[in-house]
Image (spheres, rainbow, N blue to C red):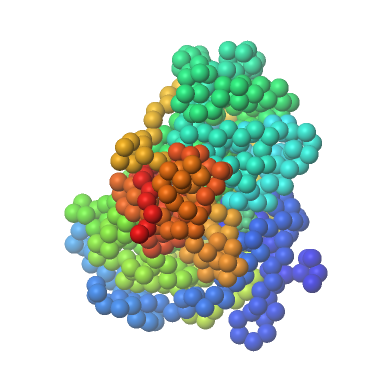
Amino acid sequence: MQADAGTPTHCPYCALQCGMRVSADGAGGRPAVTITPRTDVPANDGGLCQKGWTAGELLTSPDRLTTPLLRERRGAPLRPAGWDEALDFAAARIRAIQAEHGADAVAVFGGGGLTNEKAYLLGKFARVALRTSQIDYNGRFCMSSAAAATNRAFGLDRGLPFPITDVARADAILLAGGNLAETMPPFVRHLTRMREAGGRLIVVDPRRTPTARQADLHLQITPGTDLALALGLLHIAIAEGLVDEDYIERRTTGFDAVRTSVSAWWPERAERVTGIPVAQMRETVRTLAAARNAMILTGRGAEQHAKGTDTATAFINLALALGLPGRPGSGYGCVTGQGNGQGGREHGQKSDQLPGYRRLDDPAAREHVARVWGVDPADLPGPGRSAYELLDALGTPDGPRALLLLGSNPVVSAPRAGHIADRIAALDLLVVSDLVLSETAELADVVLPATQWAEETGTITNLEGRVLLRRRAVPPPPGVRGDLAVISGLARRLGQDPAAFPEDPRAVFDELRRASAGGVADYSGITYERIEAETGVFWPCPAEDHPGTPRPFLDRFPTPDGRARFVPVDHRAAVEDIDDGYPIYLTTGRVLAQYQSGAQTRRIRALNEAAPEVYVELHPDLAERLGITAGERVRVTSRRGTAEGVARISTAIRSDTVFMPFHWAGDGRANLLTNPALDPTSRMPEFKVCAVRLERVA
Ligand code: SF4
């Protein structure tokens, strides 16, 4: 097949949004699909990971839902229904619940994989059609700590505030809590280019992951102590006179307070807390300071903590002290995330947000967006609960009694997942739109079969802030509808003007452009035609003749005074430390061949063969102490529940820590164990560390 044959589009999974071409042979019924990587998309530059190569199998999965399902009363089985019947049923129940309990009795939960158009229309639907404040999304569990930290420091949250190709220009990179070799393998091409040109990679991770194995230096940290490490590194930089005084003077504010705040973090103290030897800390700082160009990147390992915002802030403080943000080839960024993790947090499906990254509590923002929506600003609800708080309140006397859920599977992916499943089961109404009968959809009263990536058109914004176009490449199976049609159909049944809730993604995007105009994430100059012609456009892009903004911090930061803000922060222990009853740390994460809750990837044969079941990775010393041998089943217990997995014994992990991937359902759910303690700023749960005990399953 020719390299340029097929429809140019993008992968359904992670935030790298690798470019691919999708060809369908079209012969007889559902098409067979061929996927080839694109070379014109810099993020993947001709590469794909195993998930991308096999994504076509999901289109023809025998598990696809092709008809709505309805459960008329609790305890009754789901039965097939027509679209009108299902939407009429859902709308009537929503009306009845709101009439009895008020507007906030109906909640909406979205996902970081939804296109910009879906995220935008879902936010509008919640505020205008439902008038509920109760909307949030699973991206809260993903990028929110880094987002809060970058907003605080730079006045703008864009995962990488520079093109991904800048990575190869760096001479040194510190990557804290990211396992790119497994989560987004084509990213490693950029790291490899950097290293082939003589650059050095330093990785912070409690596990010797495939990424850490490629590093020049691996800092094998105690889980939950990244913040103390960043404070110790800045202390060393100041003590050794390695900070960039000129940059600090010209481009920042607040350094003196931060200098004072890290003065007590002498290296030996940081070593005691983190387990990282002082010599390795000094080597890290000297490597970064000596580099012509250097980057500090954080991932979920550092961010998914009840102090994740402060941890990301501490690494930003270090980057600012070294003069990195805004220098081409240098900078701070956060990596990985869901497919539209970036765009999904810009256009209004967050509880406190309006389109264009506007704040819902800002009167001018409410005025602008209300004008675009043709409503009175006073009618827009205020901010609601964050994701975990929303899920935790479901079915309680003061919480929502109904939930509309798109693109998420919280029964597997939420922290303290057993409790969240109970809360969902306590609802009066659950409406789920999904491709397959996920573990959450199984609990629903109405299940709506959705189209997926290659069957629909829409924009996504990758981790660089580059707005891309996913194009429809194959027809959806008969009986399936897109999420925009679902939102539109429900809005119409709730008395809204159909013109205000169009099904056409281009019409939705044009309205999104107007709603985002003048906001931080300004898309008003971006059109489908420009995205196609330019292979993506970087926001902010305030006019059609504006070139887009690959590096938004070059001359100034988007703060009132144009300067980046140092913010003093201090270390605090993990919310739950180890003790006699729960003497081992648990950390969780992803594996190469599965994705998020696994609802999609567990249905792909090659991926299941590569990663068929949940495992518990533990050090040989710990295994010997507990009498556990490789391959036997072990039970892991935290204060919230019990999960089981197959023992995998490895020297790659610290002897005080076990690791479980979180892609599996049932009693293999790692999130049965995780701690929902929340970051006070971002409301991010503490996914990455809790205390557990281990035993063999009899
Ligand atoms: Fe898809 Fe991410 Fe793999 Fe690229 S790295 S092919 S976007 S899952």
The quadrant of the rendering that contains the C terminus is bottom left
Q: Quadrant of ligand 1?
A: bottom right
Q: Nearer the viewer, residue 663 or 478?
A: 663
User: Residue drawn at (68%, 34%), measured in percent from left and top?
Assistant: 216
User: Residue drawn at (33%, 41%), measured in percent from left and top?
Assistant: 582
User: Residue drawn at (58%, 59%), measured in percent from left and top?
Assistant: 593
Q: Nearer the viewer, residue 41 or 468?
A: 41
> Taking the image as drawn, is residue 682 in sight?
no
Residue 582 drawn above or below residue 82: above
Residue 12 drawn above or below residue 674: below
> Taking the image as drawn, is residue 421 in sight?
yes
The quadrant of the rendering that contains the N terminus is bottom right
Residue 377 locus on image (x, y percent):
36, 47
Residue 616 locus on image (x, y percent):
47, 52
Q: Nearer the viewer, residue 107 or 207?
A: 207
Rendered image quadrant of residue 666: bottom left
Residue 254 drawn above or below residue 175: above
Residue 323 locus on image (x, y percent):
64, 23
Query: In the picture provided, is 336 more to the left or to the right than 660?
Result: right
Residue 680 locus on image (x, y percent):
36, 35
